[in-house]
Image: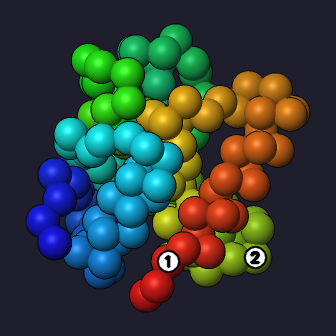
Amino acid sequence: MDHPIEFFSEDIDFTLPNPDKVSDWIASVIEQHDSELIGLTYIFCSDDYLHEINVEYLDHDTLTDIITFNNADEEGTIEGDIFISVDRVRDNANTHGTSFEDEMHRVLIHGVLHLLGFKDKTTEQEALMRKQEDSCLSLRNF
C-alpha cells in the first residue's frame, strides 16, 4: 500500500527498519482515529540538530526526542513534519529498559497522536498519551 509518508535523515546516517510496514501501521492508526492522511514527513536527526530547532522555533533550550509541526489546513486531516532525535530515542530506550525499535515506534506514533489532537502538558494528558501510545503499539503486526 502506498502512503504519503516519507522518512529522511538530516545530519546523521539512519535508516528506519521496515519502513513500508511502519507506514502501513501509522496509516491504520490515523484511519482508526477517523482522520485522513494527507502527508507525513519524518526527519531523523541528532540531538544537536533537534536542539537547534527547539531553540529557534519553540524557544526551548532543552534536548528532546521529538518535535512535531502540524501543517494541516483542515480539521480531520493529518499533515506534518516530525523531527526525531535518534540519539534521544537510543538513550531513552536504555533508560526505560526497552528495545530501540519499540522506543522508536513509540516516538513515531507520539508525533502522530499530537497531530490527532492529543496533548501531554499536564499529568492527566501525559497519562492519556501513554495509554494511546500503548494502544497504538499493540496494533503493530510486524
Residue 23 placement: quadrant: bottom left
Q: What element carries label 1?
A: loop
* 95 over 29 or under it: above or below: below
- Does residue 133 appear in this view? yes
Identify residue type, mark 2. Gly
* 36 over 20 or under it: above or below: above
The x and y percentages for residue 109 are 50, 54
* 51 over 108 or under it: above or below: above
> Observer-nearest residue: 7 or 93?
7
* 59 over 85 or under it: above or below: above
Count of picture labels: 2
Identify residue type, mark 1. Arg
The x and y percentages for residue 5 are 21, 54
- Does residue 52 appear in this view? no
Please name the residue that numbered disc 2 is placed on.
Answer: 97
Q: Residue at x 65, y 69 (%)?
A: 93
Please name the residue that numbered disc 1 is placed on.
Answer: 140
